[in-house]
Amino acid sequence: MASEEEIIIEGAVSIGATVTYADKGRRSPAVILIQGTGKGDRDGNQTGLKWDLYRNLAGTFSDMGCVVARYDKRGIGKTAGSLSTAGLSDLVDDAVSVIRHIKSLPFVDEDRVIVCGHSEGAIIATILSRKEKVAGLILLGGAGVSLKDALYYQNRLVADQSESMKGFKGFLIRRTNGGEKGIAKVDSIFGKASSTVKATIGVAHISAKWLREHGSYTSEDLVFIVRDFGGPVLAITGTADLSMDYRMLDAFDGASNVECFTPENVNHILREIDDDNSILNIRKQYARLAAKPMDQGVEKRIRDWMSSKFTQA
């Protein structure tokens, strides 16, 4: 039976983390979980949304015999700093600090440390692979997709799906996001981040540094880094993912180190959908499906990949 310990890791800021392990008497492979955007905690929960996505993933990897670490982002939970001023580079550095700490544990095999990034975490995992040696990458709902291209995709879905929406709400969405208006809004946000001297932009107080640094990476850049990575990569994006376009995985065709999986009817939180999958109702869908287990096909693919490469050593 797995045990959990809460720890504080000292990096550029103090990082609150949870380490899950089954046996301290042997050196085991380790998995570091890196979460997506937003103000969710290390378990994947935030106000109004209780997913437990990363807690559940930790249990899945622990069942495979791995040590697992998940941690809070800057300014969230027990991690110091501010998310509203942190840049992408800061989030990468924090992940590296966690990896280095986990490698130092006597019950971890430092040559079998795998990074599992979800959504923006897949971008962070990709970038850090050039800063810190890791044995493998698992990229869930975000492999080879820049933040800007992800936002383009989401805005196109909003525009397309609002066309059939009746009433004032549909009219309002079409007026603000119809046609190329949503794309122009994305470009405007990145443009403001590049030109401002302020730490944040907009009423949501989004970190300008975070946007500028994300804007410096194209999808092509991220694909190149993944293809150039020396170790094995598992990339999974479901066909019902409304945050990332699963067809972007085609960019990895011919990459001998990258195994891609596009499970049918699986959404961004790795659950099988049960509705018409509209991005306009996505929060309701997530809230409804969060209590369900991760899609069995996704879990099996992860288990098989881990078993063939790391957990049998």
Image (spheres, rainbow, N blue to C red):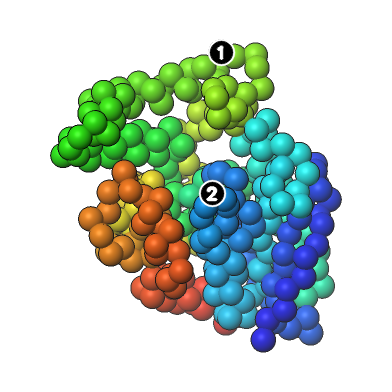
- Residue depicted at 69% across the width and 47% down the height: 76
Instruction: Please identify the quarter of the rendering in which residue 20 is found.
Output: bottom right
Residue 126, how many percent across, how many down? Answer: 54, 48
Give the number of marks.
Answer: 2
In the structure shown, which secondary structural element does the residue marked by tag 2 occupy?
loop
Tag 1 and tag 2, C-beta contact below 8 Å: no
- Residue depicted at 25% across the width and 60% down the height: 275
In the structure shown, which secondary structural element does the residue marked by tag 1 occupy?
helix
Give the vertical position of 84 relative to 313 (above or below): above
Instruction: Please identify the quarter of the rendering in which residue 63 is found.
Output: bottom right
Position of 233 compared to 242: left or right? right
Q: Amino acid at mark 1?
A: Ser
Residue 125, how many percent across, how many down? Answer: 57, 50
Residue 96 visible in this rendered orientation of the protein: no
- Which disc is residue 82 wearing? none
- Which disc is residue 36 wearing? 2
Q: Residues within 10 Å of mark 2 (few under 14, many from 20)?
A: many
Residue 141 visible in this rendered orientation of the protein: yes
Dividing the image into 4 quarters, which one contains the N terminus? bottom right
Give the vertical position of 61 relative to 243 (above or below): below
Between 56 and 92, the one lying in front of the other is: 56
Q: Which residue is mark 1?
A: 195
